[in-house]
Image (spheres, helix red, strand yellow):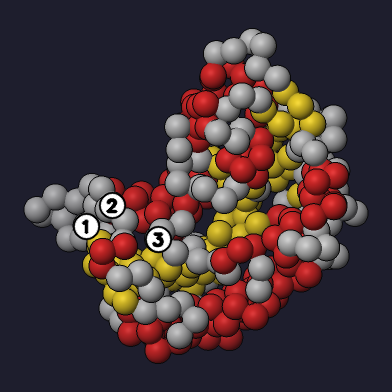
Amino acid sequence: MTNASTPAPGTALVLGITGGIGAAIASRLAARGWTIRALTRRPPDQRPRMDYPVEWRLGDSLDQRSVREAARGAGLIVHGVNPPGYARWREDGLPMLANTIAAARDAGATILFPANVYVFSATSPATVDETTPRHPTTRKGKVRLEMETMLALAAQEHGVRVIAVRAGDFFGPGVASSWFSQALAKGGLAARSAATLARPGTGHAWAFVPDLAETFARLVDRRSALPAFTLVHFAGHHDASGRDLAEAVRRVIGRKDLPIRPFPWIVVWLGAPFVRFLREALEMRWLWTTSLALDNGRLRSLIGEEPHTPLDDAVRTALAG
């Protein structure tokens, strides 16, 4: 936190502050004295209450003028916005990022970008680092690769500074549309069962959002010593057995007899022809049939130990919503 004799670090524009990762990063930056500014389409009476002051701006991340005006004077832009409904990645996702890059270039701001594992595929090694070749085979993976390329080129050709952290599936407070809350432990602390989404013995990478947000904040603390384009991997919680999180749900709820059942993927298969969200989810099925872990060696070389909440504590917080 800053005090009367320490100037505030500056202003951080947060795109997607109503989402789990945007809100979490904003909270960690606010705790360090950053002024938080948020761009939203929501009218004042529909904006969430935050536990820190927010300078609200009305606008749309798809409108470049709105983003550029909101970014004026900002030192950071948190790109925590994604197309709604797990769809329209190319139609909306790429233009939104282009607007963020244009605004960062104008303002001289650093972009904070949550990257993901979609850029890999079932042929990738079981443990990936920042040098692992990216050969996505899905539509969303190819779009995410384009987004990472856009950011790298912005840094190389225009001097735009970027801090990107690649992580696994999000879970935690405020992350409403996640595999954890919608499938693995539906119902939160009142869940009557837990689900295993992965094949037995298939490892899966999970990211507890408060830990990921703290990681971004620690990188921001060291931003002057980072290269213009910084991409690091966040290891998070690796579910090596495919049922570690489900077992943690059982422990936290305190019911040894809580059923743990395989997720009914057949329902997704049957509904996919009729429901776009299910089609989009099914495209990423490989992440539940192929083990994938993130090597965080480079991150640790920059900030020391990765922020890491013990699994049961993280699951307890996530279940509480």
Under mark 2, the amino acid is Met
Q: Nearer the viewer, residue 295 or 89?
A: 89
Labels 3 and 2 touching (C-beta < 8 A): yes
- For label 3, the residue is 17
- Mark 1 nearby-residue class (10 Å; few <14, some 14–19, many ≥20): few
- Up the image or down, 187 lies above or below 142; here it is above
Which of the two discs, 1 and 2, sits closer to the camera? 2
Labels 1 and 2 touching (C-beta < 8 A): yes
Residue visible at 80% across and 46% down in the picture:
267
Q: Nearer the viewer, residue 316 or 259?
A: 259
Residue 89, horizontal then vertical, whole percent: 66, 72
Q: Which tag, 3 or 1, sits closer to the chain's start?
A: 3
- For label 2, the residue is 50
Q: Which tag, 3 or 2, sits closer to the chain's start?
A: 3
Residue visible at 49% across and 81% down in the picture:
62
- Up the image or down, 247 lies above or below 256; here it is below
- Up the image or down, 187 lies above or below 288; here it is above
Give the quarter of the image for residue 289: top right
Can residue 85 be seen in this snapshot? yes
- Mark 2 nearby-residue class (10 Å; few <14, some 14–19, many ≥20): few
Under mark 3, the amino acid is Ile
- For label 1, the residue is 53
Give the quarter of the image for residue 26: bottom left
- Up the image or down, 64 lies above or below 220; here it is below
